[in-house]
Amino acid sequence: MRLDIVANRRKGSKVKEKESDWQERVVQIRRVTKVVKGGKTLSFRAVVVIGNERGQVGVGVGKASDVIGAVKKAVADAKKHIVTVPLSKANSIPHPIDGVSGGAKVMMRPAGPGTGVIAGGAVRTVLELAGVKNILAKQLGSGNQLNNARAATVALENLRTFKDVARERGISLEHLYGQ
């Protein structure tokens, strides 16, 4: 076994984090044009959600002159904006919460085991890749998929666990339940 480690060092191979754990889903690809002096330049905008289905999820946006380049840039952007989600024992969220981004508002409510993910559009993608299995969610306001995905991540980012609340109040966890 020691020889394997030495052999790997000689080859210069590095131990990498498992990239296979992370899934990526393209939520939207839009063709956008920029009007310049010489005419119109065409490019693509991609909105991508990445997650490991164990409580981490991110939303990213990328623009490039081709679709593949836009998706790659969006994945890189999503990795920079990863949010950790506290999941309950029922693979749901700990408490009801709302999230707002731009004109989009997302309402999320915890659900019991066996309910499934009741959500639509980009919010459903964000919740599934975050690892949430039982939840009720509703998009309110805008139908913009980017803003809805961002509103979902804002809501998931603002979730607090019982431990967090007890720590903020300066009391024990047992005392919090006793009230």
Image (cartoon, grey):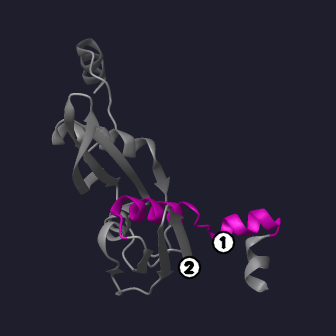
Q: Amino acid at mark 2?
A: Pro
What whole-number distance in Å separates the C-alpha atoms at marks 1 and 2? 13 Å
Residue 140 within the segment the image draws in magenta:
no
Q: Is residue 107 left or right of residue 27?
A: right
Residue range (magenta): 143-171
* Nearer-N-terminus badge (1/2): 2
Q: Amino acid at mark 1?
A: Phe
Name the residue carrying label 1: 162
Residue at image point 67% right, 67% down: 163
Residue 9 visible, this orientation: yes
State the image quarter where residue 14 is shown: top left
Up-down: is 89 above or below 157? below
The percent coordinates of residue 89 (x first, y second) are 48, 76
SS at circle 2:
loop
The percent coordinates of residue 70 (x first, y second) are 24, 40
Q: Residue furthest right?
A: 170
Q: Residue furthest top?
A: 10
SS at circle 1:
helix
For the residues bearing labels 1 and 2, Cβ distance under 8 angstroms? no
Name the residue carrying label 2: 96
Identify which residue, 178 or 124, lies in the foreground: 124
Q: Residues within 10 Å of mark 2 (few under 14, many from 20)?
A: some
Secondary structure mostly seen in the magenta stretch: helix
Up-down: is 78 above or below 15? below
Residue at image point 53% right, 68% down: 99
